[in-house]
Amino acid sequence: MISYNPKSWISLIFRSYSHNVMAKLRPVLIFLLIYTTICCYVILGLLKLHEQNFESTIAVHSLLGIVLGLFLVFRTNSAYDRWWEGRKQWGSLVNNCRSLALKMNAFLPTSDDENRLFFEHMISNFAVALKDHLRNQINVNHFQGFSPVMISEFKLKSHIPNHILKLSYLRLNELYKSKIISGDQLFLADKELKAFSDILGGCERIKNTPIPHSYSMYIKKFIFLFIITLPFGFVTTTGYLTIPIVLIISTVMFTVELIAEEIEDPFGNDTNDLPTDSLAKKIKENVNEIFWHN
């Protein structure tokens, strides 16, 4: 995710991200440049319709533009809602990781290094596992504090975050049976682990429920038809200025759609995706400090 100053107009206008967007749009803009130039040449240079009192009109495109604008607003808002929902889920994860670490730090004896290390590693590794699980690229060798035996065990699992929660629940139950923690303490710790499961499910819901295919398909068709017919609405009025006009309008519409496509899945590695790497790192640092820097 990009860090920026929203009050700095100059840096935002010339930011490198704009160049990345233009790089993605370059092929389609080159096509539109050639297409619009040919349309202008045929209508103005060969047919000379502007000399025959033939006037094009933008009335149809004005009406279609209003409808298309509403579609794009809904598309962008829907994508942003998914991005913001993902951010809220990860904000809850940060809070619940701290809360569970604080509770286990208070519940466990200070001399019980084994269980303290276990929960420190499980809490930190859950955040890492969730981040990688949402990107479909889990590497268990990057987990903190796991023995080679545990690494081999995790490699056999298809859902690593679930397995981490399973091991955490099993260890909590062992602590309760051994009377290291009380029933009330077990209940308090269970609330945090249940919240982990809820956050996992919420993130998977966002990840696995894309914008409906028909909606995404038709909005792209509408943009294409609007842009491809746009030169005919301007050409006899603006002449060869139609070329930059079409390119500017196309850039605006395609950019809005590109941004919506990027943020509708907020857990990847795109420029505007959530900073899950830094959040997982923050969780690890906070949990370590809670357990070992009393």
Image (cartoon, rainbow, N blue to C red):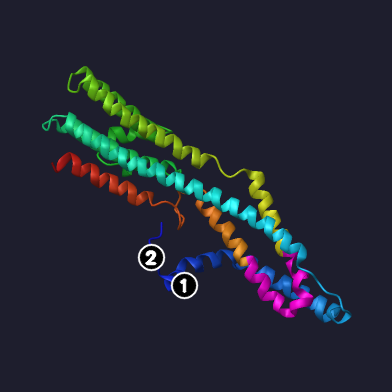
Please tell me which of labels 1 and 2 falls first in the chain. Answer: 2
Q: Looking at the image, can residue 265 be seen?
A: no
Q: Residue furthest left?
A: 111
Give the magenta range: 228-250
* Above or below 159: residue 271: below
Q: Viewed as shown, does residue 87 lie left or right of 25?
A: left
Q: Amino acid at mark 1?
A: Phe
Q: Give residue 281's position: percent from left, percent from top.
A: 30, 48
The circle drawn on residue 14 is 1
Q: Give residue 73's position: percent from left, percent from top.
A: 59, 54
Q: Viewed as shown, does residue 4 lie left or right of 294?
A: right
- Assess whether residue 91 is covered by the magenta stretch: no
Q: Quadrant of residue 12?
A: bottom left
**Which residue is at a point 77% across and 62% down the rendered structure image?**
60
Q: Which SS class for mark 1?
A: loop
State the predominant SS element of the stretch in magenta: helix
* Above or below 3: residue 129: above
Q: Give residue 6's position: percent from left, percent from top.
A: 41, 64
